[in-house]
Amino acid sequence: MGDSARPTVALVEALSPLDVRGSDLLGALTHQLRTPLTSALGYLELLADGSFGPITPEQADALRTVEASVRRLSGLVDELDPAVAAPARRAAAQEPGPRDGA
């Protein structure tokens, strides 16, 4: 290794523990966010299927709107989670794209 690469290697080695701590923090944060979202989705499904009594068509529309919002938020949390986001990004990168001239 040349002398010019040594400072870069040292910097990468010094920052590596910070990257791990950041990933750990994001993992814990996304877990804490995902837990209430999962409960909310469960109760929304129970409400929608009439487990707590009949619902009106207007209430069903409102429940669908709330469910869509909770699912969208859950997807954003998944994008933050390094354990979920990194494999998803790798899979997307491996998918073939549109071919030129096809």
Image (cartoon, rainbow, N blue to C red):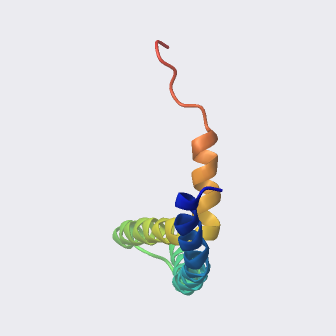
Whole-percent x, y for residue 63 in the image:
42, 72
Question: Where is residue 68, by image quadrant?
Answer: bottom left
Q: Is residue 68 left or right of residue 13?
A: left
Front-lying residue, 24 or 66: 24
Whole-percent x, y for residue 43 in the image:
55, 81
Q: Is residue 100 above or below residue 3?
A: above
Front-lying residue, 98 or 75: 98
Residue lying furthest top in this view?
101
Q: Residue at x 53, y 31 (%)?
A: 97
Quadrant, the N terminus = bottom right
> How many callouts does the rendering have?
0
Residue lying furthest front in this view?
3
Q: Residue at x 55, y 81 (%)?
A: 18
Whole-percent x, y for residue 64 in the image:
42, 66
Whole-percent x, y for residue 10 in the image:
58, 72
Front-lying residue, 53 or 74: 74
Q: Does residue 49 show up?
A: no
Q: Is residue 59 left or right of residue 36?
A: left
Q: Is residue 7 left or right of residue 17?
A: left
Q: Does residue 48 show up?
A: yes
Q: Is residue 66 above or below residue 88?
A: below
Q: Residue at x 61, y 81 (%)?
A: 17
Question: Where is residue 94, by image quadrant?
Answer: top right
